[in-house]
Amino acid sequence: MIGAAMKRIVSIKELESLRERIRATRDPGRLRITICGDTGCRASGSIELAGALEKELTRRGLNNSVDLRISGCPGFCQKGPVMTVQPLRIFYRQVGRLDRQQDINDIIETTVIAREPVQRLLYEDPETGEKITDIKEIPLYRKQTRIVLKNTGEIDPDSIEEYIAADGYAALAKVLVTDPEEVIDWIKRSGLRGRGGAGFPTGLKWQFCREAKDRSMRYIICNADEGDPGAFMDRAVMEGDPQSVLEGMIIGAYAISRGICPAEGYIYVRAEYPMAVKTLRKAVEQARSYGFLGENILGTGFNFDIKVKEGAGAFVCGEETALMASIEGKRGMPRTRPPFPAQSGLWGKPTNINNVETWANVPRIINGGPDWYAAIGTEKSKGTKVFSLAGRIRNGGLIEVPMGTTLREIVFDIGGGVPGGKKIKAVQTGGPSGGCIPAELLDLPVDYERLAEAGSIMGSGGLIVMDEDTCMVDITRYFLEFTKSESCGKCNPCRLGIRQMHRILEDICAGRGKPGDIELLAELAGVIKKGSLCGLGQTAPNPVLTTIKYYRREYKEHILNGFCPAGRCQGLFRCEIDPALCKGCGICIKTCPAGAIAGEKKQAHVIDPEKCTGCGACYEKCTLHAVRKVRPTKIRSLETIQDSVPDSRLGLVR
Amino acid sequence: MDKLQEILARYEKCRSSLIPIVQEAQEAFGYIPREVLLKVAKHLCLPPATAYAVATFYAQFHFTPQGRHKVRVCQGTACHVCGGKSIMDAVQQELGVSPGENTPDYRFRLERVACVGSCSLAPVVVVDDKIHGAMTAAKVKELIRFPGGGKMEREAKSGKMKRRTKRTLG
């Protein structure tokens, strides 16, 4: 490696010659095996796989003819561990899941020596059964536009040289010889908006911070406190391509502070992401030793350094003012705005704070040009968005699509639809601050405005697919349970209101709902939205409002009939055995904790409705699907409730 | 307390060092004993109440000893949709404790987490920082019986499981 004898790069010319040198040492015909080392694949055993493969290659004396490396997430987490072999363009999934040694032997004999794919390990199209060799041909990848994720899963995140070879720091070199105002103008022209959820135009934010009156210091912060349950895009970017984030931040610091005052950077990472912290710390160290951080960057006289700060487990710290309080060593509680961070942020100095994905977009925009970037996406939302696709979906993982792609394309064309022949019920975007978008609205193009119209938000990019077995009241209760425990307690409507809403929803899920509960929920939601300081309180009622709007019937079934149509809320359904399907195996008799099931061996069993508690244990256990969830016998009248809350009161626009 | 002095020496004497110091102290002691927090406060010239207020705000910090094996059951959205609650129920049943509690022998500590970012593998359980995906009630019970995984897991697969199970459950 050139890295061992590396000295600080002192000029832009030197950077270019280093890039040439790194590229020249590469043999394009040499076999490169890349194994995903991201948290997902790691959990499926990818690190052990890499170790075993290396050992076997060494044993056979082949270790010098193959480059083996561990990369970030290529996106196909559900089928991990995944492996790519270049330049043969082969993609293997679930390597070593069944028999690691056999898979390794086959890969070495067939792929490394004979340069042919191992058929057994290739991805199989679930529709056609066709084997697909090239990763780019897999449905999950075909419809994607990978800009932010360009390097994720391709390069070794721990090697700055691989990043440099992939055009890394070329954008910085370009920026360092440009007027800072012009750089801000590029970002403005590109139409980039904050990827953390709110969607504020990034260029404008930078300009506000640059023009702030206080000319003593500028702080540049990367918000990596990705707390939304169901979202892992930022983690994947930090673990797969950390240098992009750093380069974006250095460019931002230059544009905001050059010629005015010194600048300092912070990355605030969530404590639950130990891998990301480690990768980032290493990346910062490397960038410093190569001269991209520190004094006199690339010999241009510009100084900037970055510190990595670890969070301590508070969701509310994703809010910018709370995050800054946490860096200062205080309780992570939000404060009123204005003054906005651009005027008075960290330690009272002008501060610019952007999300991980926003920073990672910056070098791409500089390299490709603002006009190229502005041509992607919709009228008001430019570029691409990274989503983490999870829940009840066949091909979950990390995806990047142009803004304006419809939810249907994301769920069905990319994600392969819902498994097990179930019907899709809703898609949840924006985490606990977002809303549930019903299956009828799947043709909604995904951009900031359209999602807001549907009552949800873009959020940081978690996309959870729910099938017919998901109870919408229960999922709302779940979100409020989360926001209830994460509310910092500063604003009363948030602290007490969410608690009350959660209590009402718990009652509904337990069959203790009362007529009027829906109206009360809607009223509370309005108060909480208006009376909270920060994004947490202002958006926490969104799941309640969207589910009332789209699934009011389900609420009513719970409240009036004591019935959970999805069969999720315990006690709000009854199990029944289909005599035609039951073979009388007796498993359900053993499983039933209430002793409600009786029947002779090899004859259809019967559930005693009087004894049945509706726990659903027999439903889970029955392999023949003979147990069905049906309405409980006691039925209250549906007519007693009326639609007394107009949609306008829910604060939603249809 | 030497350990603490070593940690304190590594940080600048300012308020923003408070959280990182307490984090390292917890790493070193397993939890934050009262005396440690008081010493940290004194070192940073902060009133003890301020240090306490900050430390209690964040979910990461504990003020009582913790069980040796940390079992964290993810209750994120994806895990919830894929049956995370039944996993939690199974773990609670197996350990006999509620989230946030230790088993009486301090062998395990049970925690619920909001999301560990491995949503594609839902439902997920994290035992001692190792993530286990696609959990079922049966699998998670097994996992808790053999928290070390590795060798025992392999033995379990090769049929020696029954004997061990009996012995462990004794």
Image (spheres, coloured by chain):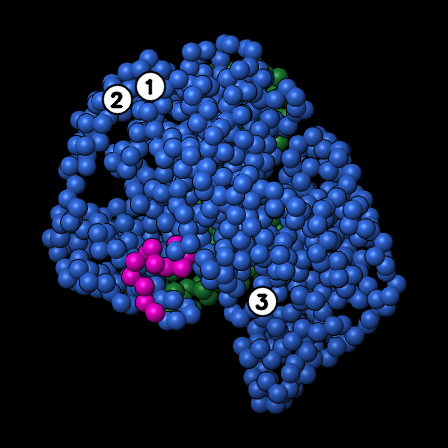
Chain colours: A blue, B green
Q: Disc 1 marks which residue? A: A177
* Mark positioned earlier in the residue sequence (3 or 2): 2
Q: Disc 3 marks which residue? A: A423
Where in the figure is residue B143, as x and y percent of width and height?
A: 46, 58
* Chain where mark 2 sits: A
Find out whether the residues at labels 1 and 2 contact each other: C-beta distance under 8 Å. Answer: yes
Question: Residue shown at 70%/44% (left/top)?
Answer: A541
Q: Which mark is residue B27?
A: none
Going by the image, does A151 lie left or right of B124?
left
- Does the image show residue A44? no
Where in the figure is residue A417, as x and y percent of width and height?
A: 50, 63
Question: Residue shown at 22%/55% (left/top)?
Answer: A88
Whether residue A137 appears in magenta in the rendering, the answer is: yes
In this picture, which residue range is highlighted in magenta?
Answer: A130-141
- Does the image show residue B162? yes
What secondary structure is marked by label 1?
loop
